[in-house]
Amino acid sequence: MTLALQSPLNGNQTPESSMSPRFFCSSFLSSFRPLRSFSLPSSLLRNSSPLSPFARLQSTMADVESAKRAAASTAVANHYPKNAQWVGIGSGTTIVYVVEAIKALGVDTSATRYVPTGYQSRQLLVNAGLTAVEFDAIPRGTVLDVAFDGADEVDDNLNCIKGGGACLFQEKLVAMQAKEFICVADSRKLQSRLLTNWKYIPIEVAPIAAFRVLRKLTELGSINPVIRSNSNPKEGNLKTDQDFFIIDAPFPPLLIQADIAGGLDGSGAGGVWEVDRLASEIKQIAGVLEVGIFCGKTGPQATAAGGVGGQRPVAAYFGMPDGSVSVRNAIQ
């Protein structure tokens, strides 16, 4: 695994952006572009080992991007609807390849409207010649045919952690307005339980309530929750498109229902929580706009219950190191 292409949000690190904090989503996504190959001067290679550290880094980065492209291509091929009218486009680092795969289908997209989850997603759509429509401009009663997005981590039940790019509120709005949410990622994001490699939950909060939320999270068992800062300390705390703050709250790995059925306690003792229960507890804290845990019903389950859309993906596509794509489907 190579640190260079992991999300910059790891441990207590904070996102880096040279742009205005308001458009952090855009800088986060734009920092991950398809790699261009280049050659090193022969003088640098002549006396090097069979694979120098730099060459290994370059190779690993290319492999990760290839894995993302393969996952996106397969997901779009399997889930992009015929005669699609409304499609959600997320802001994860794989979304560049999702849009690329949509264009590669060669279908008529002139009547299709694409709903982005952030500034850069919108720019990506516009640059691809696709029609972008902001979420608040969707006609009343409209349900998206499908929504594609990435994730920071995905567990065995397809619960997700999202928000590394500070777009979690808009991402959840779009996912919950779609008939089905499809997750696209590389194999590093697949773990048996959330908070295994990705160590904290992003939470979008009103600035005026941030310190109160920090105290409440500590009471719930979070280990040193912090307000996310900009890379430039002079710019202060990072702000989302809603002018809210992001709190990154570490917790022990989150349990799933199988763990509870096996006798483990997910009620919060010692800071150990079951996924859905912790998401609900955090959402109830006054000042919290949204929680970066995507759990609960899938789109079809929500529809069957008389609602619209679900937070949890119906399927997740993971690009593997060997070039294959692993598909996980939610139990309906």
Image (cartoon, grey):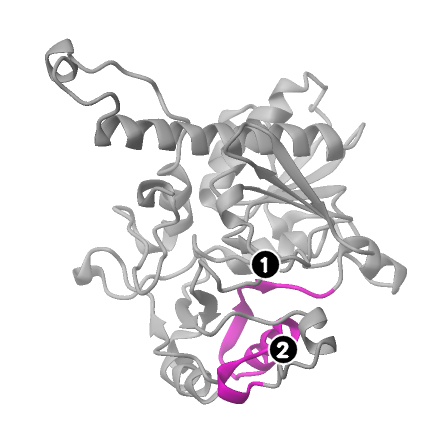
Q: Amino acid at mark 2?
A: Ser
In this rendered view, identify the residue nearer to me: 169 or 318: 318
Residue 88 located left or right of residue 248: right
Residue 110 located left or right of residue 161: right
In the image, what residue occupies the spot 15% across and 12% down?
41
The image position of residue 3, as x and y in percent, is: 32, 45
- Residue identifier under label 2: 280
Q: Is residue 315 magenta?
A: no
The image position of residue 260, as x and y in percent, is: 69, 77
Instruction: Reply above or below: 117 against 226.
Output: above
In primary-sequence order, the first of circles 1 and 2 is 1
Looking at the figure, which quarter contains the N terminus?
top left
Looking at the figure, which quarter contains the C terminus?
bottom right
Q: Amino acid at mark 1?
A: Ser
Start and end of the magenta stretch?
A: 268-296
Residue at disc 1, secondary structure: loop
In the image, what residue occupies the spot 43% across and 29% down?
63
Residue found at the far front of this picture: 50
Residue at disc 2, secondary structure: helix
- Residue identifier under label 1: 192
The image position of residue 62, as x and y in percent, is: 40, 27
